[in-house]
Amino acid sequence: MPLRRRDILQGLAVAGLAPVPGRSAAPEPPALPVPPLVELQPGVPATLTARVGATEFFPGKPSPTAGYNGSLLGPTLRVRSGDEVALEVRNELPEATTVHWHGLLVPATADGGPHDPIEPGAGWKAVLPVRQPASTCWYHPHPHGRTGLQVYGGLAGMLIVTDREEQALGLPSRYGVDDLPLLLQDKVFDRGQRLIYPRGPMALMHGVHGNTLLVNGVRAPRAAVPAGLVRLRLLNGANARVYDLAFEDGRSFHWIASDGGLLREPVPLQRLPLAPAQRAEILVDFSDARPALLVNRTPAAVQPLLHFAPAGERRPTALPRKLASWQTPSRGAVAQRRRLTMTTGMEGTGGMQGMHGMPMPHGFDGKPFDMARIDQRVKLGDVEVWEVSALPGMMMDQPHPFHMHGVHFEVLRRDGQPPGPLDAGRRDTVLVQEAVELLVHFTQPAPRVPFMYHCHILEHEDAGMMGQFTVT
Ligand code: C2O
Ligand code: CU
Ligand code: CU
């Protein structure tokens, strides 16, 4: 049956949970697809066209998907800090969308949140004054109530900011060679190996967790890499899954950047948790030329993500001892403290149904998102402490990835204690299981169009676990 334009919406909106499809007998892993690189230049607007298409995640089994300038995912955009660049977004989807630059510090009018819908057939022009440190960011749709489905359907891409300080470090930066963009997602396939988007109480409660892991849209691919130091830009683009990344052989690697850019110094690790929407850059030493396998660990299994096949001349690796210097705003400067609680619709209501037999919406402090309500008002330039916690509900020991638009923050405390090494760095998304205290610096204006804060489990966000703030 030929795929039609509307299939992305109709074909994916199938209820019910799917069993794990049979393991493919493919002996040779497919090559890692590297999205095309688009260098953004001032004065040369780039175009992103959101459209539907079809993707064969399993050979001979096309599924309806969506992508930017293609049928799945989108190009990697790269921009130099200090440049002001323009993007023209075209919407060829059969429904409204928006494009949000997750991690970019730009004024709210350019942020692409739910207040900036692009109707089908229409376009939107974003001018992005990029003035932030080198970092790995991304872009994805943000239409209220439809973000989960659109991202899941394939609308997501990476956005890399470079700057002089980072370039001077000599880190691996040959795109697609020793600097690899890795977009991690998991999706549900039915017995017929077709993509489905499960709905229903389980999806609403926990978010959609896939039965199949994908890297750049492909199952357990293989990357040919030089036998030296390789930089991986890891982006958790999944709707709900928290990844626990490691190498199968237990080798250690160096964590060098969080959401907001380079850490002060490399951190040696053997495991790296990555929550939805978070990014991490790591350096891996392949100079021993031994094949390696990046995996996701769960309590029950070790799931293959990406095979590495190092080849070529072995090159000794040198790691910079210092990466970046940046100042933490002084705590004396804190203008205000705010307290926010992420609440699920199931608390204290006897299960998945609300008091009156209806599922209750997710929210903050018991209130679901309301586009017409400003939840917080902040002064431009202020430093604040946001204390964010999550109410444990029935069967809900699940942590929530809390994300804020238009800011970087640092984790000051977790569960009342100074945070551990994994909370280092500047970020825009933090996993809230224990209560966290965040030191937030508001540098971007949002006088009329507000910025969002929300759970980045997209089914929670779509169901109302989102609030908005102005910055004036
Ligand atoms: Cu990645 Cu409000 O989003
Ligand atoms: Cu964002
Ligand atoms: Cu959540």
Image (tube, grey):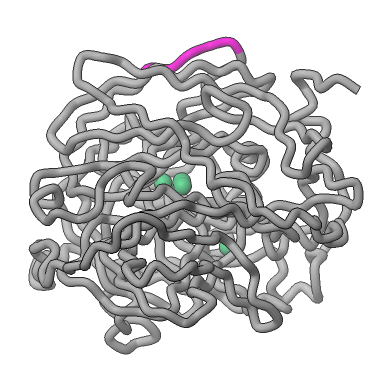
Residue 360 seen: no
The structure residue drawn at horizontal position 12% and vertical position 72%, both measured from the top left corner, is 321
- The kind of secondary structure the magenta stretch mainly shows is strand
Residue at 26% x, 28% y: name it: 128
Residue 164 is left or right of residue 445, and the answer is left
**Relative horizontal placement of residue 156, taking residue 413 as reference (left or right):** right
Quarter of the image that includes the N terminus: top right
Quarter holding residue 73? top right
Of all residues, the one furthest to the bottom in this rendering is: 417
Q: Where does residue 444 sit, x and y in percent of width and height?
A: 22, 41
Of residues 362 and 419, the one drawn nearer to the viewer in this rendering: 419
Dividing the picture into quadrants, the one containing residue 387 is: bottom left
Side of 366 relative to 249 (left or right): right
Q: Which residues are magenta?
A: 121-125
Q: Is residue 47 above or below residue 395?
A: above
The x and y percentages for residue 183 are 50, 50
- The quarter of the rendered structure image containing the C terminus is top left
Q: Is residue 260 magenta?
A: no
